[in-house]
């Protein structure tokens, strides 16, 4: 299917471009994350997508459009979307108005600022994990998104209550995953976030 890019997506791409324009490897990672999150967003809206929809190639092309404007035509894609050119001018000319759109964009995509390496770790790891679920276990994108969200919830609870500094995506053994989950679950029960339940083997 085709769906026109909107100002919210453009704002996310411009923010990512400005944070990574001097680091090619980092920009590639941001492009992959944005592709994954935008695809997931539209799936959650009940919109059917195909392999080309907001894929890495498409995101890269729009990044090149932004680069063309940023570099005054010396580099980048000359005939790109007018939306991205207009949004980049807004970024330059009215930062407050741009930031309002960017903040709304982050809410729509459940995305945090790219400046935090810890947040980048979360979304990079989640992206790869969900991709692995879909490719290796034939799980659809919506189900993969739910698994990814559950893991981040466990990590966030663990961090808030200082239960473990270990990142769940770095845990390799099932026994460690179970131990990690039981720690978080026990604390959630203690503070009445959850009813008293047990984890089934």
Image: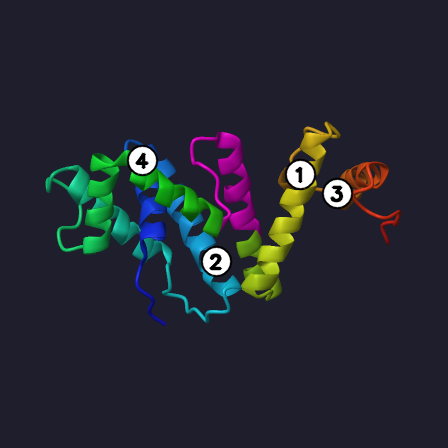
Among numbered discs 1 and 2, the one appearing first in the sequence = 2
Among numbered discs 2 and 3, the one appearing first in the sequence = 2
Q: Which residue does the numbered mark 2 point to in the structure image?
A: 41
163 within the magenta span? no
Instruction: Give SS at disc 3.
Output: helix
Q: Which residue does the numbered mark 1 point to in the structure image?
A: 155
Q: Which residue does the numbered mark 4 point to in the structure image?
A: 96
Total labels: the figure holds: 4
Among numbered discs 2 and 4, the one appearing first in the sequence = 2
Count neighbours of disc 3 (C-alpha within 10 A) and say few if under 14, some if 14 to 19, many if 20 or more: some
Count neighbours of disc 1 (C-alpha within 10 A) and say few if under 14, some if 14 to 19, many if 20 or more: many
**Residue at 38% from the left image edge and 36% from the top image edge:** 26
Q: Position of residue 163 (x, y in %)?
A: 75, 30
**Residue at 85% from the left image edge and 48% from the top image edge:** 195
69 vs 200, left or right, is left
Which one is in front, 158 or 173?
A: 158
Count neighbours of disc 4 (C-alpha within 10 A) and say few if under 14, some if 14 to 19, many if 20 or more: few
Question: In 3D space, how far apart are the residues under numbered discs 1 and 3 (Cα atoms)?
Answer: 11 Å
Q: Position of residue 34 (x, y in %)?
A: 41, 49
Instruction: Give SS at disc 1.
Output: helix
């Amino acid at each position: 299917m085709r769906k026109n890019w909107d100002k919210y997506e453009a704002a996310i791409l411009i923010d990512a471009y400005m944070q990574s324009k001097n680091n090619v490897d980092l920009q590639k990672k941001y492009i992959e994350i944005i592709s994954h999150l935008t695809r997931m967003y539209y799936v959650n809206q009940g919109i059917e997508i195909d392999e080309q929809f907001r894929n890495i190639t498409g995101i890269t092309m729009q990044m090149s459009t932004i680069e063309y404007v940023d570099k005054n035509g010396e580099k980048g894609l000359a005939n790109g979307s007018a939306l991205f050119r207009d949004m980049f001018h807004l970024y330059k000319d009215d930062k407050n108005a741009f930031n309002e759109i960017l903040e709304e964009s982050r809410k729509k995509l459940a995305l945090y600022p790219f400046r935090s390496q810890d947040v980048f770790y979360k979304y990079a790891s989640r992206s790869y994990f969900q991709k692995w679920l879909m490719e290796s276990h034939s799980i659809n994108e919506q189900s993969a998104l739910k698994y990814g969200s559950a893991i981040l919830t466990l990590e966030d609870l663990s961090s808030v209550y200082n239960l473990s500094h270990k990142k769940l995506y770095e845990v390799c053994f099932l026994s460690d995953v179970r131990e990690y989950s039981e720690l978080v679950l026990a604390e959630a029960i203690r503070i009445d976030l959850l009813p008293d339940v047990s984890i089934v083997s």
